Image (cartoon, rainbow, N blue to C red):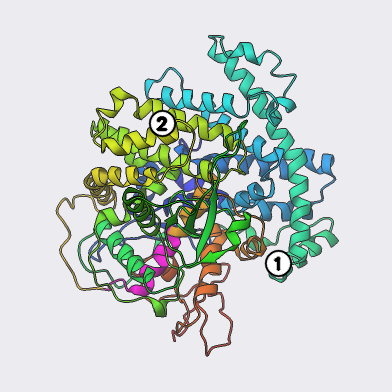
Amino acid sequence: SIASMDMGLLLQDDVFVDFFNTFLNLPIFGQTPIYISGMGRWYLWPELPSPLDPSPAALLAWLEKHRLPQFCKSNLCLHLVLCQKLLGFIRSGEAAELLNWQSADQWLLERCISGSHGMRHFRAFVQGTAGEELIDFWLITERLLGLDESDGSQRDLFLSLIHRLRATHLREGSSVITLCTTIVGSLPKAKHIQSISTRREILSKMQEQALFMIQSYWLPKFFMHCKMGMEEDKSCQPLLQEYQKRLSQASWQEPPGLSEPFPMMHIKRTQGVSGPYCSPKAKAEIWALVKEGRDTQELKMATFQVKPERQPGPAGSTEELCLDKDTLGSIPQQSEHPANTAFGGNRGVTFPGRPQSSAEQDLENLCKEKIFSDLIPSASLAQLPSLKKPVETLDFLPWALSAEACAGRPFRDFLQCQNRSMETHLLDLWHDLEEFLPVVLDSSRENSFFLRHLIGEKICKTYLEEDSIEKLPLETRTLVSLWNHLICGEFSPWIFRAQKEICKLLCCLYEEFLADDDRTFLQFMAPGSDVPMPKVPGHAAGRREHFHLSQRMNQSLKLSQALHGTRSLEGISSKHWQLLAARDPQKGGSIQAEMKLLLGSTGKGSTGEVKEQTQCWGAGHSISSPVSDLPIKEKKSKSPARSPRSRKGKARPEKVT
């Protein structure tokens, strides 16, 4: 239903805009725009050369054709649908009657759970409980019921999801089976029946039951959790004051200003950018800054315990991995693990307690390279050096591929359209290995033991059987070593080696993918411009803008991975309440809140304030343009940053230090 809706109508929903902005800024894509609904303003990156005059209608047509279908395939879209169902329940008279909620309670809970951050907070709250299993089951079933089993292109995914359900949520003793006993009394027989409609009907009824339990039991518990947490955090006091004000007025009505017509949609233009439109070059410039800046700061390394659970047998050996907290890719954060509190100077992967052979030393270096190749710095701008060394696509390809799984697999669709069956097979292997990593590294995950064996066996049977090994253009030693570990559901550093070999084979094709994305974008935004745009004098993006762009994409990726399951959810902390207080659905939503906190904590030592949405939303925008409320702290200035925008979308200029 989302894919068939008009893009202009979708963008009038702030909840959709929040999830869609998170999706659009994943670093797999070439053009990564962001929409500020309160202003009706789009920020493009890379920005089009100044001779072109893009129209909002053309941009919406491009989004509807080339971004919305991919969004509907993503896990972010599943969370949007779940969020909308939870919001529908919160606003209903049924919830008010069943849970004795007043309009103020409904308003506050909506604020807490709306958007991608709200859903991440809710999932972090239910982590380790039956609520986590119910949500996971609902999401998998929602994806499964949307597939056509008779379609050959969807059948593999359909069967994969069925096997996953059987191995986890449909096994005896699971929370789902316990809850839906009356519905699934004949479920074991249902595995063998041929009627698709009957199987779908059973799953649909189970999904409805799971959703009702989430709404009627876990939402009220989450509401109480939010109220208590907000009372203890100073940043949430304005929200609580508004909540108390609404409580005191039984017949509260929204102020008239909130029902004003939507501002006219437009695309932010600056003094112009130099050079032809080329997203690969723009990505390389950002990644060069990331690589250079990475070497100037002290990287904090978190130690993780890799414990392959050999249930129901004796525990296996313990291997230690030293990983950065903010590593991109699917290397998970285990914030609640005891070992995660220890930060050391060891940078890389170590295997203590036994001597290392030369082969193991090579693998350790590969692990180190894999981890560091994905880092985004959190240093202040004053620490970032100038761009010196050229960057190749291979340097940032792991970063892009990590985002592809969260973005509906657009690169895979491109390879299939090019009839690149072998490369598609390799990309699938890369992603299956990426999915295996967080499961095997985090034994505290729900159904971790079953999932790592399920995924490990799937990888071996799909890619590593003898007849398959002969076809894959990877080193035989790499493939054999993968088999030896994955068939037992064990972690292996050979995973990193295999992924690196795959990246080398896919690098040129990813460049073709970006070039194709650029051509398609220009066909909509500048019809008739088949030749490259000539170089024109204009504003060139600087280090500050590149830094903010890298952080914006990094925050989008981390948030998407947490919801997708390729990054462990962080435990509840003060950051969740600060994000809740900072989140404004009219000013960028979840991504804006992340950037506001990030720049507030890393801006020490830099001069001036971040004066323009451009400095957080995109490169190539004039620094003297109307400002935003996203500050970088200044040592000498004690005046707080002010919001430049009134409700009607007007902006007032401010001086830039």
At label 1, which amino acid type do we have?
Cys
Residue 236 - label: 1
**Which stretch is magenta?**
539-553
Q: Quadrant of residue 98?
A: top right
Q: Name the spot of residue 369 as percent of width and height, x first.
A: 35, 56
Q: Name the spot of residue 31 as percent of width and height, x first.
A: 33, 54
Residue 543 - label: none
Residue occupied by mark 2: 459
Q: Is residue 205 above or below residue 324?
A: above
Q: Name the spot of residue 563 as percent of width and height, x first.
A: 55, 46
Q: Is mark 1 on a helix, strand or loop?
A: helix
Q: Name the spot of residue 624 as percent of width and height, x first.
A: 39, 79
Q: Distance between the residues labelled 1 and 2?
A: 46 Å
Q: Main secondary structure of the magenta part?
A: helix
Q: In this view, does 602 lie above or below 17?
A: below
At label 2, which amino acid type do we have?
Ile
- Point 31% across, 24% down: residue: 466
